[in-house]
Image (spheres, rainbow, N blue to C red):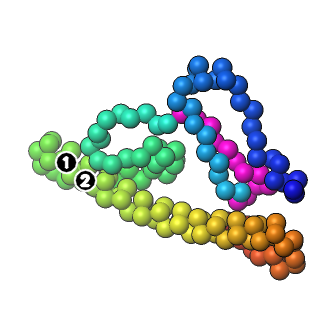
Amino acid sequence: MASWERLDHFLFSPAMLMWFPKLTQMGLPRALSDHHAIIVGEPNIDWGPSPFKVYNNWLEDKKLMGEALNGWKEFEVTSSKGFVLFSKVKAAKLRLKSWLSKVKREDNETDKLEDNLSKVEEKASVEGWSDGLRKERLRLLADL
């Protein structure tokens, strides 16, 4: 067993389940590190239906709020207050939709690179590291 294969562990106490009864774990692919990251946490809180679809992970992106504010500020309309509010929310939503499609494209490209990197590392664990595999791994890491 290669030394990097033994790094995929974490400490856990049964008492943690008393404090966090819905605790979950998820292993991430080994992309930029020499170990598989393990995420331990509780599921997202369900706040009920929202006016339009917003996922919790979007809120982690600092650019989201800027995009929403820009969509809100750039749209100027003079009419009744209700129509102005409706129009501004619609403009912000369209701006976020455009932002989301760009983020999805970038995520898909990153996922492909990470998948290829995993395949290279899997091949290396079976066949050993050749110069070609090392160069391919470095190229993929540079593209990430």
Q: Is residue 24 left or right of residue 124?
A: left
Q: Is residue 59 left or right of residue 48?
A: right
Say whether residue 34 is magenta. Answer: yes
Q: Which structural element holds mark 2?
A: helix
The answer to the question of whether label 2 and label 1 lie on touching residues, with beta carbons closer than 8 A, is yes
Residue sitting at x 61%, y 40%: 25
Residue 122 is situated, as x and y percent measured from the top left of the image, at: 75, 67
**Which numbered tag is attached to residue 86?**
1
Residue 121 is situated, as x and y percent measured from the top left of the image, at: 77, 67
Q: Is residue 128 left or right of residue 93?
A: right
Residue 72 is situated, as x and y percent measured from the top left of the image, at: 32, 50
Label 2, on which residue? Answer: 90
Residue sitting at x 83%, y 48%: 6
Q: Which residues are magenta?
A: 31-42
Q: Residues within 10 Å of mark 2 (few under 14, many from 20)?
A: some
Say whether residue 18 is magenta. Answer: no
The amino acid on which the numbered mark 1 sits, given as a three-letter code, is: Phe
**The N terminus is located in which quarter?**
bottom right
69 vs 106, nearest the viewer: 106
Q: What is the quadrant of residue 41 in the picture? A: top right
In this rendering, the answer to whether 108 lies above or below 26 is below
Q: Residues within 10 Å of mark 1 (few under 14, many from 20)?
A: few
In this rendering, the answer to whether 137 lies above or below 69 is below
Residue 79 is situated, as x and y percent measured from the top left of the image, at: 12, 49
24 vs 101, nearest the viewer: 24
**Which numbered tag is attached to residue 36?**
none
**The C terminus is located in which quarter?**
bottom right
Residue sitting at x 51%, y 48%: 61
Q: How many marks?
A: 2
